[in-house]
Image (cartoon, grey):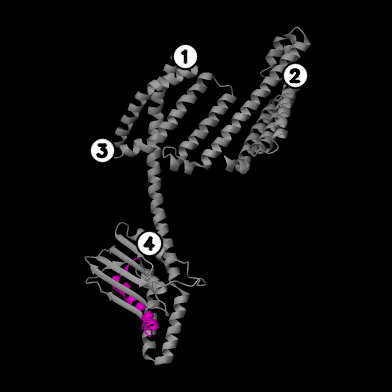
Amino acid sequence: MKDLVIKPESLPKPEFWAATTIYVFSVFFLITPALENEFATIRTWNSYFFEEQNLAFNYYQHYFVPQLIRNTVLYLAFLVLNFTVLPKLTRKEALVQNILFILLTFVVIGVVLGITDTYLKNYLFNSYETEQETYNILFQNSFLYAFWLLLLFGFYAVIKFASLYLLTHSEAIQSRYGLITRDVLTAIVVWMIGMFLLMMGNADGQIIVGAGILIPLAILLYGYSFYSLIPISLRKKKPFKAYMLRIVLMLVISSIPVFLIGLLLTNREEAGLVYSMLNAPFQLLFTAPLSWILYKRQMTGKEEMYVLQRELGQTNANFDFLRSQINPHFLFNALNTIYGTAIQEKAERTCEAVERLGDMMRFMLQENMQDKISLTREIDYLNNYIGLQRLRTDPNPAIRIDTDIEQPPVPIQIAPMLLIPFVENAFKHGISLREPSHIKVTLDVKDNAVYFDVSNSKHLKPDNDPEKYKSGIGLSNVKQRLELLYPEKHELIIRETGKEYFVHLTLQLNG
């Protein structure tokens, strides 16, 4: 509720336009008879009472103007109370002034209704002994009606804030109470508004009680069907039949409580019996089938959404991964390594470096765009990357790099760039030119399964290192790609100690 009080603008526009629409239609229905019967006698619901008292009835004096004034005052009162007074009261601002303003509004409405009734019900002056008695009756009824309108407005405010609270916190409510979904909350809100409209329209009491009993039971049955009945029934050979049998059993059991509720609300046994008898066919023929249809439709929608999310997630993951691979930091280090090597050794190592780098760039620009590539090419890329990094680390005897990477015995396909992020991460975080460091990479292929291990030393980075608090290169991305491309066909284990980082990946591939 606090969130709604802080932000009272949650519903102003819909409420304003709804109230304005009702007011405009009321004026339209007042004007239309006058336009259609400009030279004729216009008859209204109260013109008959004038005729019974042998009084002349004037449409404008005894109906149009009084009704226009009443409707205008009620419309303005609603706008002021709903958009000015109510928000301040909920925020506990200027309580005394706003309470006094509500009382003043009550008095104004009562007086206006009383004055307009002296014209709308002018025929009553012939029904009582004195003119003062007529005025007393008219104004007494007008203030009672004004009080009734304020009570209805208070009920409306409660419904509005309760509805907003329920819908705003629907996710939290559902997470705590699985039975209460957003659809159930929406149905509760609609039911409360419907009950308000029935009460405001002075509907028949039996209709109000019936709606107050049958609709909540329908909402409860709908929520329980989604939460338990339908999921359980779907496991049976004939799910719909099993579902309907459970519904019938529940309706038989609930017949007595429904009878007692009807008896309690109406104090009449026959009324309670009628509501109990109406509940069973209503729920069986309407609520139960509708719940089944909506559940099946929701399942279909979720399946389609899952497929779309999976495809979209795979596309985004591939795109982000491609973008992350073009690492300027790595390229600059590689170029600097090649440049230093060229100065020191003139040709031999430079040629090797250029050849490896060229092969890697060719792989990234061509084969990396394919859905699947040969595992052999993925291994070639790994070897080129590791070989290029060795040119930088070999001169330092404190850095040890060990590899045991086997080529697959038979042709096998793999999604590109799934293995390299773990090796990149090892070189990024496991190599220090000032401290002893080690990296070990092993890859084995057996029965179309890849067993890939990477371990590396860890070094504390200085506080001013911009990479200190960043996670490994592409690790979150490769985890996502593994989930999307190889669901239930991979096992990724990552262990970390104070001095070492270890990754084990088992991947089931197709030949």
Secondary element at image label 3? loop
- Magenta stretch: dominant secondary structure: helix
Q: Quadrant of residue 446?
A: bottom left
The residue positioned 44% from the left and 87% from the top of the image is 340
**Residue contact between numbered discs 4 and 3, judged by CB atoms under 8 Å:** no
Q: Does label 4 or label 1 sit earlier along the sequence? A: 1
Q: Does label 4 or label 3 sit earlier along the sequence? A: 3
Marks 2 and 1, how far apart at CA:
42 Å
Q: Does label 2 or label 1 sit earlier along the sequence? A: 2
Marks 3 and 2, how far apart at CA:
72 Å
In the image, which disc is placed on residue 237?
Answer: 3
Q: Does label 3 or label 1 sit earlier along the sequence? A: 3
Amino acid type of the residue that numbered disc 4 sits on in the rendered structure: Lys
Res. 321 in view: yes
Marks 2 and 4, how far apart at CA:
79 Å
Amino acid type of the residue that numbered disc 2 sits on in the rendered structure: Tyr
Task: From the viewer's side, name the closer residue of 172 and 363.
Answer: 172
Quadrant that contains the C terminus: bottom left
The residue that label 4 is drawn on is 479
Marks 4 and 3, how far apart at CA:
38 Å
Amino acid type of the residue that numbered disc 1 sits on in the rendered structure: Arg
**Residue contact between numbered discs 2 and 4, judged by CB atoms under 8 Å:** no
Residue 259: % across, % down: 42, 19
The residue that label 1 is drawn on is 268
Secondary element at image label 1? loop
Q: Is residue 396 magenta?
A: yes
The residue that label 2 is drawn on is 119
